[in-house]
Image: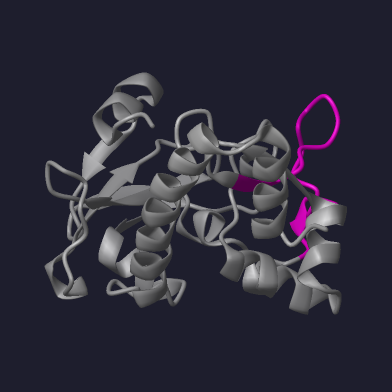
Amino acid sequence: MNSIKELKEQLGYEEIGLDDTFTFHCTQCGKCCIHREDILLSPKDLFNIAKKFQITPAEALEQYCETYIGCNSRFPIVRLRPQGSVKRCPLLKDQKCLVHDVKPTVCAMFPIGRYLTLSADDSFPKNPEELSVGYIFNNPECGDGIETQTVREWFRSFNIPLKDDYFFTWTRTQATLCKHLQFLEEHISEKTMISIWNATLLRK
């Protein structure tokens, strides 16, 4: 898995502090919903989308998502399935988000991203209070510059908690499962491994 430092260098992201300011105002132009192959979903996102459409998570996965196995993590990854040559988000219709009130966390945070800073051995502390969260700013090519706010204010406006227990728990769960999946892949058959991956993705 690429380090945060490598990703920032490759993608041009800027480190930003919780009380640092950035300029961005969403004009609902829909540009941030095209040319996108990176709208990754957590289980919480998937369940929220399913509830919005009154379908099961498995049905939401089948209708709107695609899955793949992380190249290095070997962890099953779920993303919204890009549509057409412009790689449009499948939940964008008439330049409006169909799940705006429950949109995926990565969309709600945009143009801010976040990550956990771990120790040198990538171990998680037992106490979540000891975890350190870092933030990055992805300079958008949409919206306008009529509003300036801090990261703290931006998160508050979308009801995203700074001490997000789900984010901590899910990230820790992913890290733990990655180690187990990497170990299993080296010791069991490909057929059995595929069954395990499918099980984690609600598939039969």
Q: Is residue 73 above or below residue 114?
A: above
Quarter of the image containing the N terminus?
Answer: top left
Q: Nearer the viewer, residue 115 or 100?
A: 115
User: Is 150 left, or right, of 41 in this rendering?
Assistant: left
Q: Is residue 138 above or below residue 113?
A: above
At 27% across and 66% down in the image, what residue appears? 152
User: Is 157 left, or right, of 203 in this rendering?
Assistant: left
Q: Position of residue 75 (x, y in %)?
A: 53, 44
At 73% across and 38% down in the image, what residue appears? 191
Quarter of the image containing the C terminus?
Answer: bottom right
Query: Is 94 colored magenta in this rendering?
Result: yes
Q: How is the image coloured?
A: one colour
Q: Position of residue 43 (x, y in %)?
A: 60, 65
Q: Mostly what secondary structure, the magenta segment?
A: loop
Q: Position of residue 28 (x, y in %)?
A: 65, 53
At 72% across and 67% down in the image, what residue appears? 99
Query: Is 176 colored magenta in this rendering?
Result: no
Determine if residue 141 is in view.
no
- Quadrant in the rendering for residue 7: top left
Instruction: Please state the extent of the stretch shown in magenta in the rendering.
Output: 77-98
